[in-house]
Image: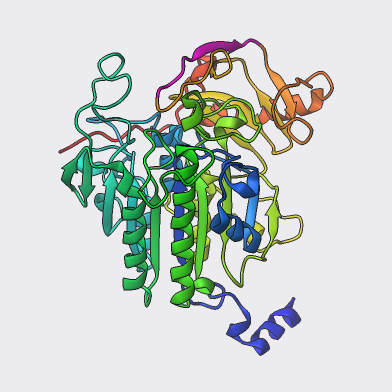
Amino acid sequence: MKQQWSLFSLLGSLALPAWAAGGHTNFIVINLDDVGYGDFSCNGAYGYQTPAIDRMAAEGMRFTHFLAVQPISGASRAGLLTGCYPNRIGFSGAPGPGSDYGIHPEEMTLGELLKQKGYRTAAYGKWHLGDARTFLPLQNGFDEYYGLPYSNDMWPFHPQQGESFNFPDLPTLEGNEAIGYNTDQSRFTTDYTMRTLRFIRENREQPFFVYLAHTMAHVPLAVSDAFKGKSEQGLFGDVMMELDWSVGEIWKTLRELGLEEQTLIILTSDNGPWANYGNHAGSAGGLREAKATTFDGGNRIPCIMYWKGTIQAGTTCNRLASNIDIFPTLSELSGAPLPARTIDGVSLVPLIQREPQANPRESFVYYYHKNDLEAVTDGLFKLVFPHRYVTYGAYAPGKDGQPGKLENTDLRKAELYDLRRDPGERYDVSTLHPGVVVRLTEIAERMREELGDDLTRRKGSGRREAGRATD
């Protein structure tokens, strides 16, 4: 080992990535909304192309078993930005206008993590961690913010307004202040992109972090005139083409500024597609069910990482990983210390570096709702516990922005799925692998002891209380 380090010293720091040689690495996390596993053309989408995203996959690393921590927008984003299972930090669901809870002030976000190392930070797009002032980005580690405080369908034009909802006008925020209401949503993808490009240019001489959380492809779908009618897939395809344009513009700007080797880009989604919106929804790529369920159509999401000179081009990672792992990954790469509080994520640096036999995440538990433990996986097998869930197959899906009818159903007994042979989770193989059932059950029991499980009427002591609005 001493001889190896001696060789590195002889080669000099130029032989090492910037982060390993003591330089800084910039980070751009692009979080799409309701984009499913099958919605990039490199993952099988048809009727439109995503050439910039496909090129990023070809020149970077594509993850095939990357999971949203929960299959719902707010909770997923809370997990991504804190590295925690949302129930650990008292966060659940998708908070709407005037919500009395949000990101707890004692939790450290990615913005706050990186500011410890002098990063300039910006958040553009959908926030969804509470709309009270104390919960907004500027109070939680970000120097700039522009976007929507929650989902873009939480406005007076919801197709079920007056029937199931009574939403107020939807604010567009600049920093902490509303600068407009019910804004034309066809402008947002362009707005967020141009602000990201400006921020990169203005901060190219110092470390920066951009959290770009696109509003699309969440309903109501909207696209600029430049992409309207361009897709064979209709409005959804148009939207995906514009999101691809956004990724391409960011990538092109990094190349022009000579920042490609100094910047890690992570492209992912918050959860699977909202399938009951039919032709305005994406594709789970053959996985079971969709958003708002803990079958993999809800949790398994696309993820591509690109970092020229550090991530080997054209690589595929089939190891288990989650969006809660982004937090500790950026911690390790930046040298920013993790908070003293418990973090559930694990660093993916060994996977990025393609260390032989690296497998930093050995298991993942599928919590949903407030604190229901519905499934557990080791990446090869998945044990699903009895629970009630929304199924998308009972009725015809909606069309042209109108939702289809949904039905609740019950999984009446625990089932084990072999994800290698059955990624669609259709065949129970629990009788064939009793030892696997025991092992995965033991993992679940350890998490129940730590965090509790409302599904089995057990109460845990590990959860921290949700934040409360103070102003």
At a point 46% along the width and 18% down the height, the residue shown is 404
Going 57% across and 15% down the picture, which residue do you hit?
Answer: 387
Q: How many marks?
A: 0
Going 67% across and 12% down the picture, which residue do you hit? 413
Q: Is residue 129 left or right of residue 427?
A: left
Asked whether residue 416 is in view, the answer is: yes
The answer to whether residue 83 is visible is: no
Residue 58 image point, x, y percent: 65, 60
Q: Is residue 403 magenta?
A: yes
Above or below for 301 versus 356: above
Residue sitting at 82 percent across and 25 percent down?
Answer: 433
Task: Find residue 156 and report its horizontal and vertical position in percent.
Answer: 23, 27
Front residue of this view, candidates 108 and 66: 66
Asked if the stretch drawn in magenta spans residue 285, the answer is: no
Magenta residues, start to end: 402-412
- Report the coloring of the rendering: rainbow
Give the quadrant of the C terminus: top left
Image-based side of 309 in relation to 132, left or right? right
Percent position of residue 362, x then y:
67, 43
Q: Which residue is more in the foreground, 230 or 65?
A: 230
Q: Residue furthest bottom?
A: 10
- Quarter of the rendering occupied by the N terminus: bottom right
Query: Where, by quadrant of the figure, is residue 120 drawn?
Result: bottom left
Image spot of residue 242 (x, y percent): 44, 50
